[in-house]
Amino acid sequence: MRKSLILIVSLLASLAFGYEQVIPVVAKAEGAYNSAWQSDLTLFNAGKKAVDVTLSYQPTGHVGDAVVRSTTIQPGAIFTEEDILGWFGLQGTGSLTLSYSNEAKTSLGVTSRTYATTEAGTFGQAVPAIPADQAVSAGAEVFLVLPAHPETERFNFGIAVLAPSMVTWQLVAADGAVVAQVDKTYETGAQEQYNGTDAFFAAGGGRLIKAVLTQGKAILYGSRVDNGTNDGSFILAQKLQSNQAPLLLGVDASSNGSLDYRDADGDNILDTPIAFSTSFLFNYIFTISARDPEGDPLTFRLVNPPAGMMLTDDDAGAIYYAPSKQDINKTIQLSVEISDGFTTTTAVLPLQITP
């Protein structure tokens, strides 16, 4: 009975706060060019049930010092704060995580704006609430384009970390050359913002920031601000690919230059198993066919070759195979790594062994 109660409590807890959105940067702070910044927050409940929302503010550079408040939004009601960090009784910069039930994710609207107050009014930037499950994860490459006229616009960039992360930051010139590189690790919950590229990279002359997330889960962003008006634009880093991975085409089992087995659906798995018989009078020689979208040369590596198999040419994907009688009536899932020197694709070749 006790185990059942624990299970029910755990299930109710996950239903109560199963959905998270992250506003990667909020502020109540002084900035460059005599600017003063603050962030607003508006929540609107379009549903028929009240929504309990937990708001967790993570200060920049202070992992583990999150400040938590909560509020309840009644059906049809609007929660709005023109100065959300003032509502927390705080100043500074950081990220804001909103947690509420999965049931409410289709009914609760969230908007936020970080803006500077001037004599002419406010100038600022809408900062979206990013669902936690849409944060980029390990293997992702994201990009931020720097202002074309750095003498009239400044650029800040930052990261909100959802899981322990490792990031390789690169400053890239207009011709694609890497000007400088910084490798950093981040703890869960960290929020960091870097004011300008020159100090962070100890170099100038870049036109692009490229960040490679080698481990973890995070949201990366940028902000460009007009030096004259302090009007800003928030930019969510774009997830792109600098290199396309190799693709499996099929297998030439007859050594005649045509494909006897294909990967027609492009999932890097042969559509049908390759047939082998241990009674065949000769040993088998077959060739894996693959292509690289950029035309880079390919190399092949057998990950889990069965007994009697060897790769005779790792540049051509040529394989020698003498099936073992121990594998009769088995279907072996042969994994092959195909690399273009930048990215590796793991292809799967089913091998069907008969007497």
Image: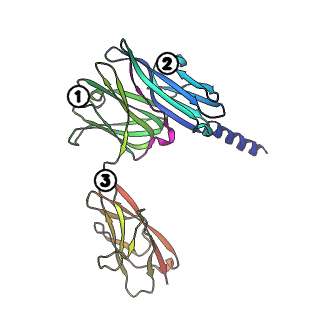
Whether 227 is drawn above or below 183: the answer is above
Q: Position of residue 346 (x, y in %)?
A: 40, 60
Which of the two labelled residues, at mark 2 and mark 1, occupies the earlier sequence position? Answer: 2
Q: Which stretch appears magenta?
A: 122-139
Which residue is painted at 26% across and 61% down in the image?
A: 297
Towards the viewer: 289 or 48 = 48
Q: CA distance from mark 1 to mark 3?
A: 33 Å
Determine the image quadrant of residue 142.
top left
Residue receiving disc 3: 342
From mark 2 to mark 1, how far is it between C-alphas?
Answer: 31 Å
Instruction: Say if the magenta span includes residue 101.
Output: no
The answer to which of marks 1 and 3 sits earlier in the sequence is 1
Between 197 and 332, the one nearer to me in the picture: 197
Q: Which residue sits at x=44%, y=70%?
A: 271
**Residue 140: image location, x then y, percent:** 39, 45
The amino acid on which the numbered mark 3 sits, given as a three-letter code, is Phe
The residue mark sitting in front, 3 or 2, is 2
Q: Secondary structure at mark 3?
A: loop
Query: Residue 38, percent across and down?
Result: 44, 19
Mark toward the viewer: 1 or 3: 1
Badge 2 crowding class, 10 Å Cα cut-off, few under 14, some 14 to 19, many 20 or more, is many
- Scheme by which the image is coloured: rainbow
Q: Which mark is residue 83?
A: 2
Q: Measure the C-alpha gap from mark 3 to mark 2.
A: 46 Å
Residue 65 visible in the snapshot: no
Q: Are marks 1 and 3 in contact (CB under 8 Å)?
A: no
Of the image marks 3 and 2, the number of the one nearer the N terminus: 2
Q: Amino acid at mark 1?
A: His
Q: Residues within 10 Å of mark 1 (few under 14, many from 20)?
A: few
